[in-house]
Image (cartoon, helix red, strand yellow):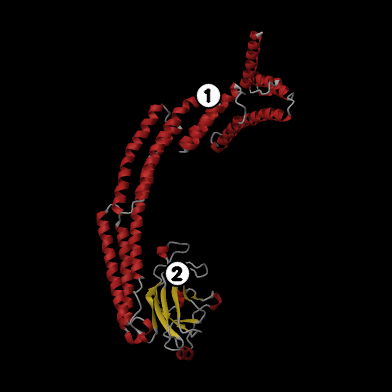
């Protein structure tokens, strides 16, 4: 009796294991027969058994495996009419097939011819992905395909190439990581030394990549060989970062020169209501000129140290800028020398010269924005008059805009105002375009053609309070507020 119980237990265990191995559950004969039919005769043969499954959800699940197989198989067959050059469509079809086949129960085996076609087509796609440098995508596709099309010869052949591509890619990523770290170094000399050290490793990486390809036995036209050849571009890409560091340093010199020119005097002037005397204005611009020369001499020393990386054209460009700015300063000083005539113009905005750094249309670089001239007054009794100088390149339709912090009226003129009476008596034209005015901003549109020379004059009329402040700025386009 005891022996019979043991035999019954063994039989039950065997039956359970049989169900597990075939994907069946609850000892459902219809499921098991369908699994056996699928694996021995093909997916279509399973349908006759699975339609007999009593449990509706289970029936739907197993019948869906047939639909998944058909969809995957159709995706593979669709490649028969796709041109070999249409890699995107071939890749899409292979990915579709993998997605469908992955969703099928692992107890259901793909027919040998389908697995062979799928594995061969997918191996070719993996090769193309490697050649395109998409190593992560190639690796992911290989892992998926190796599970779905297990044992395929083409996948087995490309396995070593996937490994080799990842090895090369890791070494390439390491160099770029070192280059990125070099770019984060603040000290310029240390930054360049770090870049040079990375660039020095590039030839060894190229040789190593070629050796890795050779060790796999990959063909010269394989994706791995193509990828290894592209490693040469690593040196070019890192060289671009190296050159960008020099460009940024040069821009820094140029920006420092421009910022020095636009530097405001510290503190109020010693004149009435904190205005600057002519001597103070003159001394300020002398210091500006001296500091600009110091920065330029720093640039010359920098260029001598890195003469292979700083072209004479760059030096000439900065020198021309410095000379142009010094010429403007000389012009300012000549204007200051005409003390009697200048004093009749009213107060002086600071910096006296603006508009030298107008951006090209569309530019958003802070270093290329027009820096404003500022003005302010306290204890205003009536209308007051100001003047300044503006530099607008020929052919540029830049706008001169005066903006106040309150809503008092502004008028802008081509001529020395002296007084309101003179304005009215001589019928001096107000250049402000009132139809384009926005809030407390008073624009002179296309100022380069409206101003007769480099001087502009403006009147601040009496307001509700006895103090005011504002700024004058040149816009590339006041309509879009591009300074």
Query: What residue is pinned by disc 2?
Result: 396
Report crowding for label 1: few under 14, some 14 to 19, many 20 or more residues within 10 A (C-alpha): some
Farthest front residue in view = 2
Q: Is residue 231 above or below residue 13?
A: below
Q: How many numbered marks, from 0 up?
A: 2
Residue 147 image position (x, y, % from top left) = 54, 27
Report crowding for label 2: few under 14, some 14 to 19, many 20 or more residues within 10 A (C-alpha): some
In the rendered image, is residue 54 in sight?
Answer: yes
- Pick the front one: 477 or 220: 477
Residue 46 image position (x, y, % from top left) = 69, 22
Q: Assign a secondary structure to mark 1.
A: loop
Residue displayed at 39% across by 42% down: 233
Mark seen at residue 152: 1
Can you say which quadrant of the picture contains the C terminus? bottom left
Can you say which quadrant of the picture contains the N terminus? top right
Q: Is residue 391 above or below residue 117?
A: below
Which one is earlier in the sequence, the residue at label 2 or at label 1?
Answer: 1
Q: Assign a secondary structure to mark 2.
A: loop
């Amino acid at each position: 009796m005891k022996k019979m119980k043991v035999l019954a237990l063994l039989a039950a265990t065997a039956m359970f294991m049989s169900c597990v191995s075939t994907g069946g559950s609850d000892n459902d004969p219809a499921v098991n027969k369908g699994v056996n039919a699928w694996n021995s005769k093909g997916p279509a043969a399973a349908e006759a058994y699975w339609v007999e499954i009593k449990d509706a959800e289970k029936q739907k699940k197993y019948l869906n495996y047939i639909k998944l197989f058909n969809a995957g198989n159709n995706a593979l067959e669709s490649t028969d009419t796709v041109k070999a050059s249409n890699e995107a469509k071939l890749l899409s079809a292979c990915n579709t097939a993998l997605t469908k086949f992955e969703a099928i129960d692992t107890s259901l085996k793909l027919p040998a011819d389908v697995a062979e076609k799928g594995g061969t087509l997918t191996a070719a796609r993996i090769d193309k992905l490697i050649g395109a440098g998409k190593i992560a995508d190639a690796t992911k596709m290989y892992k998926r395909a190796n599970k779905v099309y297990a044992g395929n010869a083409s996948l087995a052949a490309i396995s070593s190439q996937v490994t080799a591509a990842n090895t090369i890619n890791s070494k390439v990523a390491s160099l770029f990581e070192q280059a990125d770290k070099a770019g984060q170094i603040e000290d310029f000399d240390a930054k360049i030394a770090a870049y040079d050290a990375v660039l020095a490793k590039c030839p060894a990486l190229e040789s190593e990549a070629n050796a890795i390809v050779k060790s796999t036995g990959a063909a010269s036209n394989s994706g791995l060989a193509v990828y290894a050849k592209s490693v040469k571009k690593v040196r070019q890409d890192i060289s671009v970062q190296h050159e960008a560091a020099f460009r940024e340093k040069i821009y820094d010199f140029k920006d420092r020169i421009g910022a020095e020119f636009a530097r405001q005097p510290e503190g109020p002037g010693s004149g009435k209501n904190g205005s600057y005397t002519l001597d103070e204005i003159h001394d300020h611009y002398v210091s500006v000129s001296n500091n600009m020369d110091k920065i330029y001499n720093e640039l010359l020393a920098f260029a001598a140290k890195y003469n292979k990386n700083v072209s004479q054209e760059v030096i000439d460009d900065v020198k021309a800028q410095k000379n142009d700015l010094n010429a403007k300063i000389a012009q300012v000083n000549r204007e200051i020398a005409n003390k009697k005539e200048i004093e009749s113009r009213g107060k002086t905005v600071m910096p006296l010269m603006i508009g030298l750094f107008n951006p090209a249309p569309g530019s958003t670089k802070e270093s290329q924005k027009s820096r404003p001239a500022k003005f302010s007054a306290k204890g205003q009794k009536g209308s007051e008059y100001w003047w300044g100088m503006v530099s607008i390149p020929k052919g540029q339709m830049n706008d001169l805009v005066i903006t106040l912090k309150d809503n008092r009226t502004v008028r802008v003129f081509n001529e020395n105002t002296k007084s309101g009476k003179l304005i009215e008596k001589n019928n001096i034209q107000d250049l402000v375009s009132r139809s384009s005015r926005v809030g407390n901003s008073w624009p002179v549109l296309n100022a380069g053609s409206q101003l007769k020379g480099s001087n502009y004059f403006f009147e601040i009329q009496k307001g509700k309070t006895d103090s005011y402040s504002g700024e004058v700025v040149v816009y590339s386009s006041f309509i879009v507020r591009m300074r």
